[in-house]
Amino acid sequence: MSEQLVGDQPSTTFGPAKTIIQSLYELDPLVLEELAQWLEQRGIKTPISTMVGASPALTHITQGNGTPNGAVYGSVGALFLRLDGGAATTLYVKESGTNTNTGWVGK
């Protein structure tokens, strides 16, 4: 049996839903990381990109070998980490196109 963590005490009653923030985009990246760790400690493995949702930039950070041009679909702001890259070809940023596999620029 797993140990209960502080804040894990179940409530017998629930009040009306409260809006604390309008969007996860309002949270500092460190807070998002803490949230992901909190969820993982409870056996919920939810990528932050899934929680954040609609932003193609935040939902598409991936890695792999070779250039993403012609291979990886994304929208402006998405990131690709090239595992076999070198100078100016390790990080790619999607600078044009919506849900296309072109427009990646090495940085």
Image: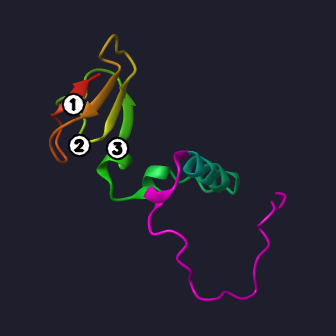
Locate residue 27 relative to residue 69 in the image: left or right: right
Tell me: residue 16, above or below residue 33. below
Locate residue 1 relative to residue 21 in the image: left or right: right
Tell whether position 7 is magenta: yes
Locate residue 24 relative to residue 30 in the image: left or right: left
CB atoms of marks 1 and 3 within 8 Å: no
Q: How is the image coloured?
A: rainbow
Tell whether position 70 is magenta: no
Quadrant the C terminus occupies: top left
Residue pointed to by mark 3:
60
- Residue positioned 15% across, 34% down in the render: 102
- Splitting the image into 4 quarters, where does residue 13 fall? bottom right
Label 3: how many residues lie within 10 Å, few (<14), some (14-19) or many (20+)? many
Please tell me whether mark 2 sits on a helix, a strand or a loop. Answer: loop
Return the residue nearer the eye: 22 or 103: 22
Mark 3: which amino acid? His
Which region shows up in magenta? 1-29
Q: Position of residue 54 (x, y in %)?
A: 33, 59
Mark 1: which amino acid? Trp
Mark 2: which amino acid? Val
Tell me: residue 62, above or below residue 66. below
Mark 2 or mark 3, earlier in chain: 3
CB atoms of marks 1 and 2 within 8 Å: no
Q: Position of residue 11 (x, y in %)?
A: 75, 81
Give the numbered dot on residue 21.
Answer: none
Label 2: how many residues lie within 10 Å, few (<14), some (14-19) or many (20+)? some
Q: Position of residue 15 (x, y in %)?
A: 64, 88
Residue pointed to by mark 2:
76
Residue pointed to by mark 1:
104
Q: CA distance from mark 2 to mark 3?
A: 10 Å
